[in-house]
Image (spheres, grey):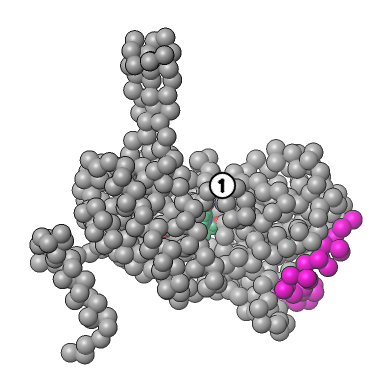
């Protein structure tokens, strides 16, 4: 047998698994799985057992468990981000690394579980936040490990355990993270399997999670199909669904800031973020000036012919209905240089983004395309821009962005769009605390309305009322 580093690491892990706090840990003759299972029933049973133990512990153990996840994400962001990119083959390395760091740093934890109180002549009433139990989780390929991490921190903070069906194309990195987290948590507080995951996820295993009687709540992050499937389940589902975020730019905007922000948001991870700027509606009075401002930010403008060539490659007939076109998955999350090649252009190394003028009815405007090409649509005035933004957001209620110095216009668009995230004069990620105020989650519950998920999203409210005493005033 060849002795490799991997083999030695495996043996060491196995030995450590048998020795915790100087005691032998029973493994029933099997290697420890550290949360990774082949079967939904086994995963749910292990998570249920872990959650029963966890529920008996105090908040301090929850803090410790979450601290393990944060530490691993931040310290190992580079190798984990690299592995995620190698497996999923979409997005950009620097942003894969960045996402793991920020999700480790900025996801809210137990500090969000503040007890609410009423105090009066009749005594006191407390509202406290209790766990649901085991939560079923579905994660997308666009941020496989970061979504799992954000969900796990929020859910553990509220005292839950979870069972995850990851996207098959991002399952390996999600399983790796799960194992690292469970090992560290087990070492810190002596509980394994607070996070469990399916090693070979399928649509059937997702359905088995939706139907499992020991799962109390679902949290699903992905496109329209999975959202619909989760909402058909008799359980309560928190659905973080698709978006197609429009940007409106009016004649009062700071154009250089608008251009810089559009590039920053749309180029991030090659436009994989559900909140990322997908199409721009700019008023005619400043349209050409805005497009000139764009060119100062490491981007390349495509002409009509080049956009046509790119469009032919980027959209393909739907396999279900040949008269409809769908996004070509091979180009999702690819670098701007790859898209440029399809457009018949050679772009300088380090090009962040491609952009160009299109009509409003263009497929790049209509579809949530998740590629580093942004279509710009010329409109006569800001009312037309807001109307088109509303139309092409498709009622997802997700994210919209405006660049304007006119507070009335901003207010009107905010009311009109009725979205979960509305950003003014910044890049889309400012709405998740990156360059704006607030906290982060990679699950923004749009159709079901919980917004940016927090530990409170995964907690049951329980009220305790004391009559006639405990008011000490
Ligand atoms: P996807 O819908 O293809 O897959 C998401 C997950 O759902 C995967 O785990 C997949 O295996 C599973 N799935 C798909 N169809 C299913 C079905 N019928 N039954 C059960 N499970 C099913 O999406 P993706 O390409 O992985 O991710 C991108 C999409 O997710 C985009 O639409 C994006 O906007 C959205 N997204 C939303 C948020 C948010 O917070 N709202 C965050 C990230 C991504």
Q: Main secondary structure of the magenta part?
A: helix
Number of on-image labels:
1
Q: Residue at x 61, y 75 (%)?
A: 335
Q: Nearer the viewer, residue 143 or 361?
A: 143
Q: Is residue 289 magenta?
A: yes
In the rendered view, tell whether residue 290 sits above or below residue 45: below
Residue visible at 39% across and 43% down? 110
What residue lies at 37% left-to-right and 58% top-to-bottom? 69
* The C terminus sits in image quarter: top left
How many C-alpha atoms fall within 10 Å of the one at disc 1: few (<14), some, or many (≥20)? Answer: some
Q: Quadrant of residue 429?
A: bottom right
Image side of residue 284 versus residue 175, left or right: right
Residue 305 part of the magenta segment? yes
Q: Which residue is located at x 41 percent, y 68 percent?
A: 76
Residue 22 in picture, x, y percent from top left: 12, 62
* Residue 202, x across and y down, in percent: 36, 62
95 is higher (above) or lower (below) than 255: below
| Residues rendered magenta in the picture | 285-310
Is 266 placed left or right of 199 in the picture? right
Q: Position of residue 352 (x, y in %)?
A: 67, 72
Is label 1's Cβ within 8 Å of ligand 1? Answer: no
Q: Of 77 and 453, which appears nearest the observer?
A: 77
Residue 257 or 121: which is nearer the viewer?
Answer: 121
Measured as percent of width and height from the top left, residue 68 is found at 34, 58
State the SS at label 1.
loop
| 469 shown above or below 333 | above
Q: Is residue 169 visible?
A: no
Residue at numbered disc 1: 438
Q: Vertical placement of 254 versus 473: above or below? A: below
Quarter of the figure with residue 282: bottom right
């Amino acid at each position: 047998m060849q002795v490799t580093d991997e083999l030695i690491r495996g043996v060491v892990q196995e030995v450590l698994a048998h020795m915790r706090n100087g005691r032998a840990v029973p493994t029933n003759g099997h290697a420890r799985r550290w949360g990774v299972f082949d079967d939904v029933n086994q995963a749910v049973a292990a998570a249920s057992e872990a959650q029963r133990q966890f529920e008996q512990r105090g908040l301090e153990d929850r803090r410790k468990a979450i601290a393990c996840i944060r530490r691993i994400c931040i310290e190992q962001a580079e190798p984990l981000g690299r592995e995620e990119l190698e497996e999923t083959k979409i997005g950009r390395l620097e942003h894969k690394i960045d996402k793991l760091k920020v999700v480790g740093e900025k996801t809210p934890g137990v500090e969000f579980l503040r007890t609410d109180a009423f105090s009066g002549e009749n005594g006191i009433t407390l509202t406290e936040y209790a766990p649901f139990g085991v939560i079923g989780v579905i994660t997308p390929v666009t941020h496989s490990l970061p979504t799992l991490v954000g969900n796990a921190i929020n859910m553990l903070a509220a005292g839950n355990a979870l069972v995850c069906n990851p996207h098959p194309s991002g399952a390996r990195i999600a399983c790796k993270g799960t194992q690292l987290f469970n090992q560290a948590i087990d070492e810190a507080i002596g509980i394994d399997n607070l996070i469990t995951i399916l090693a070979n996820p399928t649509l059937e295993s997702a359905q088995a999670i939706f139907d499992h009687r020991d799962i109390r709540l679902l949290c699903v992050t992905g496109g329209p199909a999975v959202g619909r499937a989760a909402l058909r389940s008799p359980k309560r589902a928190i659905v973080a669904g698709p978006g197609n975020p429009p940007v409106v730019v009016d004649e009062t905007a700071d154009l250089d800031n608008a251009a810089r922000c559009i590039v920053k948001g749309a180029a991030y991870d090659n436009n994989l973020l559900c909140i990322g700027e997908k199409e721009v509606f700019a008023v005619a009075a400043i349209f050409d000036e805005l497009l000139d401002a764009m060119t100062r930010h490491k981007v390349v403008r495509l002409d009509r012919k080049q956009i046509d060539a790119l469009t032919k490659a980027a959209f393909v007939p739907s396999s279900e209905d040949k008269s409809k076109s769908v996004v070509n998955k091979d180009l999702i999350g690819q670098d701007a240089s790859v898209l440029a090649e399809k457009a018949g252009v050679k772009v300088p190394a380090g090009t962040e983004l491609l952009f160009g003028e299109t009509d409003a009815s263009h497929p790049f405007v209509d579809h949530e395309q998740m590629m580093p090409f942004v279509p710009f649509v010329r409109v006569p005035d800001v009312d037309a821009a807001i109307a088109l933004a509303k139309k092409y957001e498709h009622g997802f209620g997700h994210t919209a962005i405006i660049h304007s110095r006119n507070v009335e216009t901003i207010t009107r668009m905010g009311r009109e769009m009725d979205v979960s995230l509305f950003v003014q004069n910044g890049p889309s990620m400012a709405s998740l605390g990156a360059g704006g105020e607030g906290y982060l989650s990679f699950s923004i519950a749009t159709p079901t309305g919980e917004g940016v998920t927090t530990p409170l999203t995964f907690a049951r409210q329980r009220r305790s009322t004391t009559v006639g005493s405990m008011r000490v005033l």
